[in-house]
Image: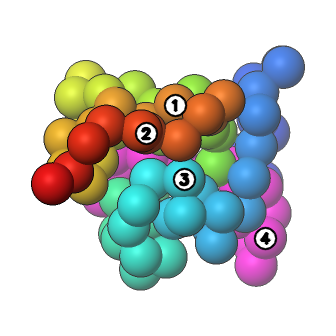
Amino acid sequence: MRRDAPRGARMVPTELAALAAGVSEATIRKWASRGKLTRYGSPGRAQYDLDELAQIAAGTGGSSPAGCPLTTDQACDRDRD
């Protein structure tokens, strides 16, 4: 079943979603299968909304590595000493 992305959404494939969230591709797929993250696209071609990933990473649905909120425009430049 195909699920179309919201209008204006910034969509990325699984590999880039994992990179943006700082988790593995398996974690992205797990989040989608558990309903934590919406999977868009057709079978064999998953796409994820960067804004939804940012909400999860910001704490409204999960967290990112080192507690840094995920932004789609810039990397987290928090000091991690």
Q: Residue at x 25, y 24 (%)?
A: 60
Measure how far apart labels 3 and 1 are at the Cα level: 8 Å
Can you give x and y, in whole percent of width and height, for residue 22 in the image? 41, 61
Dot 4 or dot 2: first in sequence order is 4
Circle 2 packing at 10 Å, graded few (<14), some (14-19), many (20+), is few
Dot 3 or dot 2: first in sequence order is 3
Magenta residues (range): 34-47
Q: Residue at x 76, y 43 (%)?
A: 11
Q: Identify whether 22 is placed above or below 52.
A: below
Measure how far apart labels 4 and 3 are at the Cα level: 18 Å
Front tag of 1 and 4: 1
Q: Which residue is mark 3?
A: 20
Q: Residue at x 15, y 54 (%)?
A: 81
Q: Which residue is mark 2?
A: 76
SS type, badge 1:
loop
Can you give x and y, in whole percent of width and height, for residue 6 in the image? 75, 25
Dot 2 or dot 1: first in sequence order is 1
Check disc 3 and give the amino acid type: Ala
Q: Which residue of the protein is positioned furthest toward the top in this rendering?
A: 7
Q: Which residue is mark 4?
A: 45
The answer to whether the residue labelled 2 contacts the one labelled 1, judged by CB atoms less than 8 Å apart, is yes
Q: Which residue is mark 1?
A: 71
